[in-house]
Image (cartoon, coloured by chain):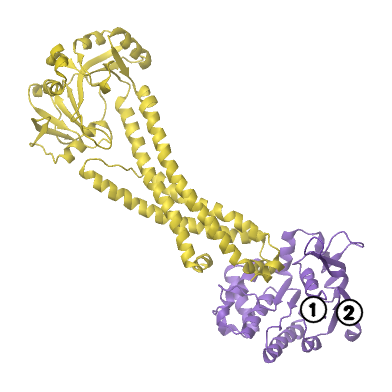
Chain colours: A purple, B yellow
């Protein structure tokens, strides 16, 4: 059973009365446990939308035939309530964004602990898990710093620690190195690669950067809301 | 902790909002204390009436027109009357302008109530008037009247230009007796006629003059029916009972209290709207943060709870500051009023506690709308918000 299986995903955005954008036009994606997969494609190809749909941040269009399917670990999440999907985001998924998206008023450890709290581990247990997670990304000594006291690379490592704190089945990255210089990119990429190799962490990364794509097991290529190549040949 | 930090992000705005609530709660506390004082006076007067019937001249004059003391004997034989006795009741100074109860002269024959007056008079100093005081110019003073005049046992006080020796001072009762001076009947009659118009004086005999007849019913007598019988049996009199008092004075006082509390509530609602505004702005600024929290698994309910707790804290702080200022205002006001013998405010624990709870609930209610709106935002759009 695949870790994530998506069939016939469509996503239409209505921008005005006559202006609709078909960001996804029937996408199938399969991710196996332990894979590190890149989604690449030109701007507007639908790769970010795909990641948002797979990350349960957006719902795909309903009413298309055949009906869309989005199964995580075998259960179809499209049939579940917003509350249940929020819990799946908290427990089964981790997110790393291009612009870090840390809560500015919280320290590094509090940002990480927040994700643990949402997954049901509050208080001391959550804080300890957060400290362990920061240790993994090499930021134990920065735990008490606020995001504005950290460099871009450090902030992204805090975000990775936050994504990993609940030991999710899948970590989703939306241009995780997009705001970083090449040295920091190598650092963050190395970190993600290490978690994939050492801990079998499954990763799905949207990127423009061929270097990031090259570090992944396979590349899903997109254009105009469709998957051109699922990259399965190279994986095999 | 996190709550406080979020509030501290926009110090000025949070402070202004808290001040808005503070002013509202301050008004509610002060006005509430004023209303409580009025209620206390009214209920005190009700207790003071007890089950007695007070008969006075139907001619009006605030019940201070003269009656002949011969009517007492006629009242005594009305069916259902246990004890009836005459009393003089008149203002010390008819022109005095003062807040609260006017100073009054009460003249009575000691012991004429035959033990039926059960109002709990307690003496701070001295003694009650007795039969031996009948021909003297001795006086017992109510607590406010004594304090206002700096009176002490053995000292004297001038009432309508006549000097009286102070033999007793009462403890505060929080109602009518506090501003009353109790005189022997004869002395009171002398004072009473001083101010009457000349043609009235010619038509009466001062030593036969009273202003009220106090009637205590026998056990089991219906007070309202008795007051009707008294009005029928005695010429041109009117009667007042505790329930009539409640209907007239009590109803007016309740209306006054309601208006006073209403003014406080309105100012609080204005304060509440400013919390809505603050929370709406604060939510808008934090749209992206709310998007982050939703994305990493924060439930809608949790987002709402967080924001509502924040606005509730604004309400609570405003409530506590408002209560503090209110207590200060009430205390200073009462201290200032004490000089003139009028404590304007009674701050009850109920008023204090309920106003703080009200402020907190108001703050929370004000936060609900912006918070639910925030929780319904699309996480992806919220994340793109700058």
Q: Quadrant of the N terminus of chain A?
A: bottom right
Q: Is residue B113 left or right of residue B286?
A: left
Q: Chain of mark 2?
A: A
Residue ID at (39%, 52%):
B323
Could you say where residue B125 lies in the image, as x and y percent from the top left? 15, 37
Q: Which residue has dot 1 on it?
A: A43
- Residue furthest toward the front? A18
Q: Chain of mark 1?
A: A
Residue B109 occupies quadrant: top left
Between disc 1 and disc 2, whose residue precedes?
1
Q: Is residue A17 above or below residue B243?
A: below
Circle 2 Cα neighbour tier, 10 Å, few/some/many (<14 / 14–19 / ≥20): some
Q: Nearer the viewer, residue B128 or B314?
A: B314
Q: Which residue has dot 2 on it?
A: A230
Could you say where residue A58 lies in the image, as x and y percent from the top left? 76, 66
State whether discs 1 and 2 lie on one chain. yes
Q: Quadrant of the C terminus of chain A?
A: bottom right
Residue ID at (21%, 9%):
B73
Q: Is residue A184 above or below residue A117?
A: below
- Marks 1, 2: nearer the viewer: 1
Label 2: element kind: loop
């Amino acid at each position: 059973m695949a870790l994530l299986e998506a069939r016939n995903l469509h996503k239409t955005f209505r921008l005005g009365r006559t202006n609709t954008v078909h960001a996804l036009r029937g996408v199938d994606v399969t991710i196996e446990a332990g894979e590190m997969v890149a989604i690449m494609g030109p701007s507007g190809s639908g790769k970010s939308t795909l990641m948002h749909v797979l990350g349960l941040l957006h719902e795909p269009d309903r009413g298309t035939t055949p009906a869309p399917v989005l199964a995580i670990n075998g259960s179809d999440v499209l049939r579940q309530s917003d509350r249940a999907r929020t819990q799946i985001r908290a427990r089964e998924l981790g997110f790393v964004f291009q612009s870090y998206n840390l809560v500015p008023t919280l320290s590094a450890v509090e940002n990480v602990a927040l994700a643990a709290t949402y997954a049901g581990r509050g208080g001391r247990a959550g804080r300890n898990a957060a400290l362990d997670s920061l240790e993994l990304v090499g930021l134990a000594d920065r735990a008490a710093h606020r995001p504005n006291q950290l460099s871009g690379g450090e902030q992204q490592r805090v975000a990775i620690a936050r994504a990993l704190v609940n030991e999710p089945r899948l970590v989703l990255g939306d241009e995780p190195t997009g705001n970083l210089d090449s040295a920091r990119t190598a650092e963050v990429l190395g970190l993600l690669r290490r978690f994939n190799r050492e801990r079998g962490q499954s990763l799905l990364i949207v990127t423009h950067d061929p270097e990031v794509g090259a570090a992944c097991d396979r590349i899903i290529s997109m254009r105009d809301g469709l998957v051109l190549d699922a990259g399965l040949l190279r994986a095999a | 902790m996190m709550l406080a930090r979020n509030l501290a992000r926009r110090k000025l705005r949070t402070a202004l909002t808290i001040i808005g609530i503070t002013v509202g709660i301050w008004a509610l506390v002060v006005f509430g204390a004023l209303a409580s004082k009025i209620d206390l006076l009214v209920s005190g007067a009700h207790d003071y009436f007890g089950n007695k019937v007070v008969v006075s001249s139907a001619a009006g004059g605030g019940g201070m027109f003269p009656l002949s003391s011969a009517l007492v004997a006629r009242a005594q034989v009305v069916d259902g009357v246990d004890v009836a006795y005459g009393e003089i009741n008149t203002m010390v100074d008819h022109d005095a302008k003062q807040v609260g109860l006017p100073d009054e002269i009460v003249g009575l024959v000691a012991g004429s109530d035959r033990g039926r007056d059960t109002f709990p008079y307690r003496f701070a100093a001295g003694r009650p008037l007795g039969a031996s005081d009948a021909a003297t110019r001795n006086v017992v003073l109510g607590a406010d009247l004594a304090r206002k005049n700096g009176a002490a046992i053995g000292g004297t006080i001038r009432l309508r230009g006549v000097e009286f020796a102070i033999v007793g001072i009462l403890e505060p009762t929080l109602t009518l007796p506090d501003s009353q001076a109790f005189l022997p009947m004869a002395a009171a009659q002398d004072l009473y006629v001083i101010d009457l118009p000349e043609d009235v004086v010619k038509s009466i005999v001062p030593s036969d003059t009273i202003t009220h007849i106090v009637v205590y019913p026998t056990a089991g007598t219906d007070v309202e029916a008795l007051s009707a019988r008294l009005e029928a049996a005695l010429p041109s009199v009117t009667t007042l009972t505790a329930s009539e008092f409640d209907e007239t004075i009590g109803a007016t006082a309740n209306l006054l209290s309601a208006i006073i509390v209403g003014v406080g509530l309105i100012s609080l609602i204005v304060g509440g709207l400013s919390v809505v505004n603050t929370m709406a702005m604060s939510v808008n600024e934090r749209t992206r943060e709310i998007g982050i929290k939703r994305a990493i698994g924060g439930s809608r309910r949790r987002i709402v709870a967080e924001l509502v707790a924040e606005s509730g804290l604004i309400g609570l702080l405003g409530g506590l500051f408002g209560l503090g200022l209110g207590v200060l205002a009430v205390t200073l006001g009462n201290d200032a009023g004490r000089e003139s013998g009028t404590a304007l405010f009674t701050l009850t624990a109920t008023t204090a506690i309920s106003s703080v709870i009200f402020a907190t609930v108001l703050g929370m209610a004000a936060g609900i709308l912006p918070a639910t709106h925030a929780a319904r935002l699309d996480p992806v759009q919220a994340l793109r918000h700058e």
